[in-house]
Image (cartoon, grey):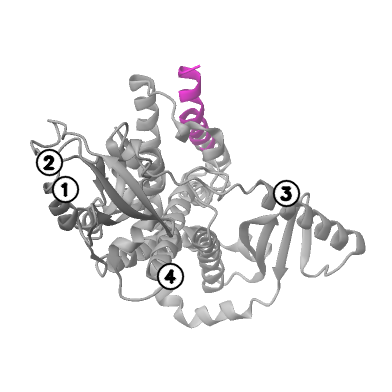
């Protein structure tokens, strides 16, 4: 069994407490003194920072013919995604009931919320927050632009805060929105989802393109240490970079193998290795190779190495038709299955793996992480919002479509019942996906 490197998140409790106190103090002062009333509004504990300077959205009006086509195609895409998401949720329930899977950390209720640092799979990093904020902007700007294209005035725009940014909003003129009907209104509701999905796919494509520029190197980086092996007993941790083996300088795995080929089981050798910027010397009494690993007769240290060329081949899978599925799974499976997925952590957080790659410029991996999280959040937010559930955008598209469909048949008064029934059914399915595993394993 290998000891794999563990990526333990920083303890953010103190920072969160300070942020809560600062937010509460600022909010209390602003509310009590009535400061900046034109720009700050409170909804209970939520603070909305808004501006009425939204004239720049009018610049989209000359592009109305193109944007209407874009919006119409977007509505078609939203409907297809809505159906696909609903079918996937139904099959998820079938899988849960029939297979009765054991509980994992993915079933922890806190992991339902996409809050960085709270959700186990979403780290509290600059790249994550950048991606989350960009996702909100992309979504709301889509609504605002299509509002102007369809002749709906935009009164204000802003962000919602609850210590941290939790959302963005665009406030259309209610009278104009009520007058809008049919496909025009559906285009407006679907624009945010369309923007998110397209932006997500574009960011993922850029991630794949950047990974194609990374060239693997052969530095002897110890990826894992077998439990109770000679290296394990000598105290060598994972993520150590070997510098000398038995007094012989090594710069790649071939050098390490050559140095060990001159040893026998039972020999004690000195190994010089760097870990977290510090160089340590380990006295290792070599063992015999396990038969299941090799028939070599030389000494065995008991380590596995970061295999960058093989990992490059796995990165290339991201350019295949299943690439989007792999990219969406990376935040979860790098945590839950580190033995097979940890090399993808380069896309989500800073890791020592970065030194195993030659990259074309400084900040390369930070850019990859920013694009990855922009892609991930945009795609997840877009597909979730497509669900036919009011108050999600997909629910409002369903409502407008149902209103117009039944209105032509003189049955408009039934539209609300149909939309409510569908919304409650989707809500029940979502809750079942979360709660059923807990009940089955209770």
Check disc 3: other Cα within 10 Å, few if <14, some if 14-19, many if 20+.
few
Task: Report x, y in % for residue 85.
Answer: 39, 42
Q: Are marks 1 and 2 in contact (CB under 8 Å)?
A: yes
Q: Which is more N-terminal, label 2 or label 3?
A: 3
Q: Give the spatial CA distance, label 4 vs label 1.
A: 68 Å
Residue matched to label 2 = 298
Q: Are marks 2 and 4 in contact (CB under 8 Å)?
A: no
Give the answer, above or below, for where 278 lies relative to 305.
Answer: below
Label 1 residue SS: helix
Q: Are marks 3 and 2 in contact (CB under 8 Å)?
A: no
| Residue at position x 16%, y 33% in the image | 288
Label 2 residue SS: loop
Q: Give the spatial CA distance, label 2 vs label 4.
A: 71 Å
Extent of the magenta region: 423-442
Residue 72 appears in the figure: no
Q: Which is more N-terminal, label 3 or label 4?
A: 3
Q: Give the spatial CA distance, label 4 vs label 3.
A: 47 Å
């Amino acid at each position: 069994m290998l000891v794999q490197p563990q990526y333990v998140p920083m303890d953010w409790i103190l920072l969160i407490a300070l942020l809560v106190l600062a937010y509460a103090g600022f909010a209390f002062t602003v509310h009590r003194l009535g400061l900046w009333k034109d720009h700050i509004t409170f909804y209970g504990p939520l603070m909305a920072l808004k501006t009425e300077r939204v004239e720049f959205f009018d610049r989209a009006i000359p592009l109305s013919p193109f944007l209407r086509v874009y919006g119409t195609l977007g509505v078609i895409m939203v409907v297809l995604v809505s159906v696909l998401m609903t079918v996937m949720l139904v099959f998820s329930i079938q899988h849960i009931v029939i297979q009765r899977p054991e509980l994992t950390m993915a079933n922890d209720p806190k992991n339902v919320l996409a809050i960085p640092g709270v959700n186990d799979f979403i780290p509290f990093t600059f790249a994550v927050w950048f991606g989350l904020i960009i996702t909100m902007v992309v979504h709301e700007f889509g609504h605002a632009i299509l509002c102007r294209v369809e002749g709906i005035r935009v009164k204000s725009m802003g962000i919602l805060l609850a210590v941290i940014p939790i959302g963005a909003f665009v406030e259309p003129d209610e009278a104009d929105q009520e007058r809008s009907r049919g496909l025009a209104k559906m285009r407006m509701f679907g624009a945010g989802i369309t923007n998110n999905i397209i932006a997500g796919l574009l960011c993922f494509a850029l991630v794949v393109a950047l990974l194609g520029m990374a060239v693997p190197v052969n530095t002897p980086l110890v990826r894992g240490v077998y439990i109770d092996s000679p290296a394990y007993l000598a105290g060598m941790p994972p993520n150590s970079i070997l510098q000398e083996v038995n007094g012989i300088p090594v710069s790649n795995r071939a050098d390490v193998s050559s140095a060990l080929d001159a040893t026998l089981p039972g020999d004690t050798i000195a190994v010089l290795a760097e870990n977290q910027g510090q160089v340590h010397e380990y006295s290792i009494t070599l063992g015999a190779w396990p038969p299941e690993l090799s028939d070599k007769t030389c000494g065995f240290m008991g380590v596995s190495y970061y295999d960058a060329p093989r990992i490059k081949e796995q990165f290339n899978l991201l350019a295949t038709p299943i690439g989007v599925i792999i990219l969406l799974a990376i935040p979860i499976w790098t945590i839950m299955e580190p033995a097979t997925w940890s090399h993808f952590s380069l896309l989500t957080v800073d890791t020592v793996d970065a030194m195993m790659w030659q990259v074309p410029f400084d900040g390369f991996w930070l850019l990859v992480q920013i694009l990855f999280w922009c892609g991930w959040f945009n795609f997840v937010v877009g597909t979730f919002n497509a669900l036919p559930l009011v108050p999600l955008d997909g629910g409002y598209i369903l409502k407008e479509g149902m209103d117009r469909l039944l209105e032509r048949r003189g049955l408009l008064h039934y539209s609300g019942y149909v939309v409510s029934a569908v919304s409650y059914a989707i809500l029940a399915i979502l809750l079942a996906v979360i709660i059923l595993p807990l009940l089955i394993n209770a």
